[in-house]
Structure formats: structure tokens, C-alpha cells
Amino acid sequence: MVSTSKFDLRKTDTLCHEISLKTEEPVYVKQLKIPNTHQQRVEKHVAEWLKLGVIKLTKSPLNSHVFAIAKKNGCI
């Protein structure tokens, strides 16, 4: 199967992936502040990813940082 876009994340049953954790304790890290200049763009991306099914809302105790880094052309 060939992807039609960078968000075309198709499922497969030909490969099984497992993530091994060092501990059963949930990993929680305090979030870094997203600069105000990037906030609107990050929210736009998150809304698009939710709509496309790339990400989903969760109440998981696990988390990780979000890094918004501007490219040379100003895009994040």
C-alpha cells in the first residue's frame, strides 16, 4: 500500500511492535512552555492531527514534551 499524504498512516498486520519500558511507573514530565509566537501554529497542527486521526485525546498518566522549533523559513 502506498501513502497518499504525509498523514496517511495506514495500519498493517504484517508487523508487530512492542515498546519495553524500564518500569511500570507512569512517566510524567512537567511541560515546557510553548512560546506565544508558536502557540497558534501548534494548536492548528494539533487540531489537524486530531481530525486526521494521527493523534487522539487521552487521559493517560504518560506524557512527553512538545518542542516547537522554527525552521529557517519560519515554519514550525
Image: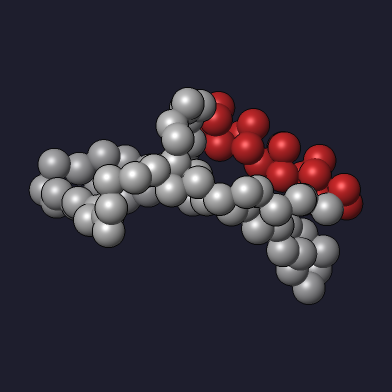
* In this picture, residue 54 sits left or right of residue 67: left
| Residue at left offset 65%, top offset 48% | 31
Between 68 and 10, the one lying in front of the other is 68
* In this picture, residue 6 sits left or right of residue 32: left
Between 23 and 21, the one lying in front of the other is 23
Q: Position of residue 7 (x, y in %)?
A: 48, 44
Q: Position of residue 72 (x, y in %)?
A: 78, 73
Q: Position of residue 25 (x, y in %)?
A: 34, 45
Q: How is the image coloured?
A: secondary structure
Q: Position of residue 26 (x, y in %)?
A: 39, 43
Residue 61 against residue 65 in the figure, above or below: above
| Residue at left offset 76%, top offset 59% | 75
| Residue at left offset 19%, top offset 52% | 17
Residue 11 visible in the current orientation: yes
Residue 59 against residue 65 in the figure, above or below: above
Residue 57 against residue 16 in the figure, above or below: above
| Residue at left offset 72%, top offset 37% | 43
Q: Quadrant of the C terminus?
A: bottom right
Residue 4 visible in the current orientation: no
Task: Name the residue at the right extreme.
Answer: 37
* In this picture, residue 28 sits left or right of residue 11: right
Image label count: 0
Task: Name the residue at the left extreme.
Answer: 14
